[in-house]
Image (cartoon, coloured by chain):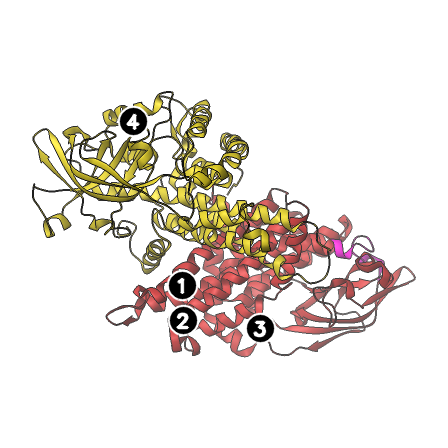
Chain colours: A yellow, B red
Amino acid sequence: MDLSLPPHVAELREKVQRFAEEWMRAEGPGAEEREEYPQEFAREALRFARGLGILDLRRMIPMPGAKVAWAEDKHLATVLVVEELARGDAGLTMNLPGPQLGGSALMVVGTEEQKARWLKPFTGPEPVWGAMAMTEPGAGSDTASIRATAHRDGGEWILNGEKVFCTSGGLGLEKSRGWVVVWAKVVQKGASGDAVKHAAMRPFLVPAGTPGLRVTKHEKKMGIRASDTVAFVLDDARIPRDHLLGSEGDEAGFKGAMNTFNVGRLNVAAIGLGIARAALDLLRELLGPVPLGGPLTAAQRDSLQMEAELQAARLLTLRAAWMADRGLPMAAEASMAKVLAGAAAASIPQRCAALAGPFGVSRKRRFERLVRDAKIVDIFEGTGQVNTLIVARRVLGYSREQLK
Amino acid sequence: MAFSFSPTPLQQRRLAEARRVARKWVAPRAAEIDERNEVPRDLLRRLHGPPYRYAGVYVPPKYGGQGFDWVSLYLVTEEFARWSATVATLLEVPGLVSTLIQVAGSEEQKQRFLPSIALGKRFPCFALTERQAGTDAAAIATRAEKKGDGWVLQGAKYLVSFGDFAGDYAIFARTGPRSAGVKAISLFLVPREAPGVVLGREDLNLGMHGHRTWRLGLRGVEVEAGRLLGEPGMGFVYAMRTLDRTRATLAAILLGVARALLETGTDYARKRKTFGQPLLEHEAVGFPLAESWARYEACRLLGLRSCWLTDQGETRGEVTSMAKALAAEVALQAGDAAMRAMGAAGTTREYPLERYLRDARTFVLAQGSPEAQKLVLTKWMLKGG
C-alpha cells in the first residue's frame, strides 16, 4: 500500500490548484450574479488547459496525439484536478470548455474516425462546448424509460423528443459551433407506446445548427448559477446517418451509457469533495485562535467531525479512481464514493454555514453559495438514492455484471 | 512502490493468517467469553505463545518480536475484532505498552523488558487513568518519591485492562509538584510481584466482557532506578507519542465490530423475506445498511492511511484521532442500521448482534472519548493543519 501521489499527478494537481485560486475564485461571484458563463474566463481556461496538453480540463481528455505523463493514472488525476477546480468555484467548473460528458460518451462508444472528427472542433483557438442529453421530463433516474426516438429515413436519422437539464447545451448549440450527444431509442417510423419502451437506446451526435433542434429553456437554479443548463426539443431533427456513434451493428447502447456514468460518478464525487473542502477551509479561517485546554465546544466538535467525514469520503473516492486506473471493476465502489461524497457535500457546507453564524448567511461571503452549489452533487449523474440502491444490491449479492 | 491501495503480499499473508486464526480459534468461543466475562487462559496462550506469537507483533525482531508494520497491525487487529473485540484487545494492550517502552525506554531498558513481552511470557498492562483523572491526565495524584537510587510509588489507578494477567504495569506517577502540571509526570514499569501492589475488581461493564478492568493500589511500592522508563518528567510526552500511533488500532477494533454488526444484519436481511422479497430490498431497511457499509469502507481507508503514515515515519496524531473518532460513529450507526434490520431477533441472544452492540457502545470510550479525540484535532487545526 502506498499513498504517495505519483509525482506527475501531484504536479498537475498543484498547477490546477493555482489556476483555481487565481482565476476561479475571482471570476466565480460575478458569473454567479449574472447567471452566465463568462466567455473571457472560458478563453483563459482554454489557454491554461492547452498549456498542459489537455483538450477538456474537466473530463481530462488530452489533446489528440498529445502524450501526457499522467495517462496511466488518468482517473486518479481527474479526481484530484476536479476537486481543486470545484474548490475554486463549482459553477465555473461545470462548463469548462470542451466536449464534456458528450466527449466521455464519444470516447467510450465512438469509432476512431468519429472521435477524430468530432474532437477536431475543440482543437481550435476559440472555446467550444459539447454536451450529453439523456434526461427527459418523464425519465430521470429511470434512464431506460426515455421516450426520444430516432428512425431511419434514407441516408438520415430523424430525431424526435424533448430533453431537459442538459449541462452546456446552450453553450454547445447556441454560443459555439459545438454538439450534443442525444440518447434516443431506435424505432420504425411512427412507432409509439410499447415499441418505444422496449427499443434499444443509442447515442446520436447532433451538431449546433441542426434543423429541427430548438433550445427552449435556460434553467434558473438554486446553485451553480453561472453554469449553463438547458432544455431543448427535437422536432423531426435531421442528422446524417453516420452521426450514430459507434459502428452500426454495435450494441453498445445502454451499457455504454452506464459505463460513462460509472466513471462520471467519480467526477461528481470530486466536485462534492472540493466544495466541502472549500467550506471547511473557510470555517477554519473564521474559527481563528481559541483558548486551549478544557472541554470542547460544540462548534469545535462539529468541525472536527466534518473533517474526519470528508477525509474518509475522499479516500474512498481516490480508491475507486485507482481501481478504475488498474482496470478493476468498480461500479459499487464508485457508487459508494458518490453516496458519501454527495452526503459530505450536502451536509458539510450547511454545517459550516451554521457554525459561521451571521457570516453563514451573508451574500458577501462564500458560505451560503457553497451550500447552494453543493445541493446538486447528490442529485446529478445519479442520485444519492440510486447509488445507495446500487450499493445495497452489491451487498445483497448481485454480481458486478448485474449491477447497473 | 507505486501509488496503490492494495496491501503488499506480506501484508496480505498476515491478514490471511489472522483471518484463519480468528475464525478457527476465536469465533467459536466469543459467546462463551461474553457469558463468563472471562478470557480462557488456553486461548490467551495460543494467541500469545508459539506459533502465532501475537504478543510480539508490535515488537521489532531484534527484541524478540515479529515487527509487523502498522498497516499489517491494522489489518490483523480488525480481523480479530470482527469475531471478538475483547480478543482484539489482547493484542492491542500489549501492543500499546510495548510501543510505549520503545518510545520511552533506553536501549538497555528495551533489551531488558521487551523480549519477555514479545514471547508472551509477561503480560504488560497500562495504568494512567485515576478516579479523578481521565481525559485531564494532568490531574493524576499517584506519586513516586525518590528513595536512595530507587523510587517509592503511592496511589491508586483505575480501569487497568487485564490487570490480573500482569506481568508488569506501565504506571504514570507524579515525580514533581502539582504546579508543574504534566511536566512532572514520569513513567514506571512495575512488576506485579512487587510488595504493595494490590489488585481490586471493577464492576461488570455493559460490553467488552472478558476485557476486565481493575483497580490497582500502590501502597509504598519500591522499584529500582532502572524501572523509571526514559527521563523523569517525560511521561506525558511518551504517552502522547505512543497513543498518536496506537490509536489507529483502536479504530481497527471499532471497525471490526462495525463489520460484525453489518455482516450479521445484512446476512439476516438477505435471507429473511417479507412481503414477498428479501428484507434488504425494502429501501427503508436496505438503505441504512448500504450507507453504513459505505461509511465503514471509507473509515477503514482513513485508519489504513493513518497507519501507512506511521510506517513512513510521519505519524500524524490528528489523522489517527480522526480515524478513531469517525470509527466510533461508524460502529454506532452500523449497530443502529443492523438492529433495525433484525427487529426483535436482534435483541435475543440467539444472534450475536446484541453482544456486538454492547461491545461497540462500551469500546467507543476506550482510551479517550470521541470528544477527547477531537481535542487533539482542534489543536492541530488551530496550528494550521
Label 1 – label 4 distance at C-alpha: 46 Å
Q: Earlier in the sequence, mark 2 or mark 1?
A: 1
Residue B9, relative to residue B282: is it above or below? above
CB atoms of marks 2 and 1 within 8 Å: yes
In the rendered image, residue B121, in percent from the top left (x then y), is placed at 66, 62
Which of discs 3 and 2 lies nearer the camera? The answer is: 2
Chain for disc number 1: B
Amino acid type, label 2: Arg
Give the label on residue B210, or none: 3
Give the label on residue B340, or none: 2
Which of discs 3 and 1 lies nearer the camera? The answer is: 1
Amino acid type, label 3: Gly
Q: Which residues are magenta?
A: B224-237
- Residue A148 occupies quadrant: top left
Element type at marker 2? helix
Label 4 – label 2 distance at C-alpha: 55 Å
Other-residue count near label 4 (Cα within 10 Å), few / some / many at <14 / 14–19 / ≥20: some
- Residue A43 occupies quadrant: top left
Q: Earlier in the sequence, mark 3 or mark 1?
A: 3
Q: How many marks?
A: 4
The residue labelled by disc 1 is: B288
The residue labelled by disc 4 is: A177
**Horizontal side of residue B336 vs A120, given as left or right:** right
Amino acid type, label 4: Arg
